[in-house]
Every structure is written in C-alpha cells, then in structure tokens.
Amino acid sequence: MSSETLPSIGEMMAASVPMVRTLNLEFTETTAERAVVRMPDQSDFHNHVGGPHAGAMFTLAESASGAIVMTAFGDQLGRAVPLAVRAEIGYKKLAMGAVAATAELGRPVAEVVAELDAGERPEFPVNVSLTREDGAVTGEMTIVWTLRPNK
C-alpha cells in the first residue's frame, strides 16, 4: 500500500476517537516534531462568557498531543500502546472564536524508543499551546504519555 492511500493521522483519530468528531477538530499539521489541531467556533460548546468551554479546550489540547504521539511513535504500535498518564492545564486568557492547539514532544523520539528497547516503560511530556486566531496564548497544557509494552 502506498503512502498516498494511507489515512492521515487526523482521519485515523476522527475514526477512533468520538470526541474528535464531536468537536469537529481539524488536523492542520501532523509531523513527529509538531501537531496543530484547530477547533472552529461552535456555539454548542461555548461557556457562560461565550467562548469555548474549558472541557472543549482540554479535549482540543489532548487531541493535539495524541496526534503528535501517533505520528512520532506509530511505528511502535506493534509492541507498545501509547497512553496518557496525567495532564495539567493552565488557562491564561479568555479564548473567543476558533482556537488552535500546537503540540511538541518534550523528549527526543530516539531517547524514548531506546528506553522501550531496554524493556522499560518510557514516559515523556507533550507540551501544548492553545492560541486564538489573533495569536494570543489562551492556555498551556502538559500531557505526560507512556508507551506501555504489550504483554
């Protein structure tokens, strides 16, 4: 199968993660270095001040982190399962309108895979920045992921 016929990370996530479809998330960039996911402005997901609900923003950020994890470690799925371990989010400014989440790995891929090769269960952070369309950072999130070896 050529790479042209493989589904994109965004398509795979939409097919396997119902919240991605629910929030109409758009995967605009997915590489092993960076993932960018956009959530359009949708009144069904507004909070009491008219912006995106905190839960929707959390899901957006977590989805961006999942996209970079799948891109960076998708070749390890035959021997390990990626799982989110914990997350911390800080809401910095009021978000209004569409919001984008930009995720970056906090450790080199090779270092994480080397730990997996050594029989360990590596943990690694993914740092996510949430921004409005005007570029203002509205939130920051760190999700710690692990690659749990298959038994």
Image (cartoon, rainbow, N blue to C red):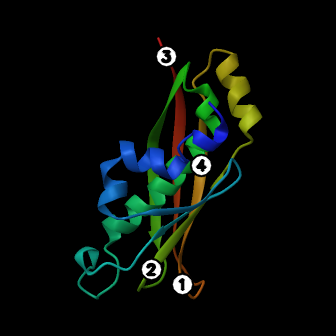
Pointer 2 residue = 98
Earlier-in-chain disc, 2 versus 3: 2
Q: Position of residue 112 (x, y in %)?
A: 68, 32
Q: Position of residue 48 (x, y in %)?
A: 23, 84
Q: Mark 3 and mark 1: span between their CA atoms? A: 41 Å
Q: Mark 4 belongs to which amino acid? A: Ile
- Up/down of 43 relative to 57, above or below: below
Pointer 4 residue = 68
Helix, strand, or loop for circle 4? helix
Q: Mark 4 and mark 3: span between their CA atoms? A: 21 Å
- Up/down of 58 relative to 84, above or below: below
Residue drawn at x 67%, y 56% is: 34
Helix, strand, or loop for circle 3? loop
Pointer 1 residue = 133
Pointer 3 residue = 150
Q: Is residue 145 visible?
A: yes
Q: Mark 2 and mark 3: span between their CA atoms? A: 38 Å
Q: Mark 2 and mark 1: span between their CA atoms? A: 6 Å
Foreground pick, 26 / 46: 26
Q: Position of residue 95 (x, y in %)?
A: 43, 82
Q: Is residue 143 visible?
A: no
Q: Image check: 141 left or right of 2?
A: left
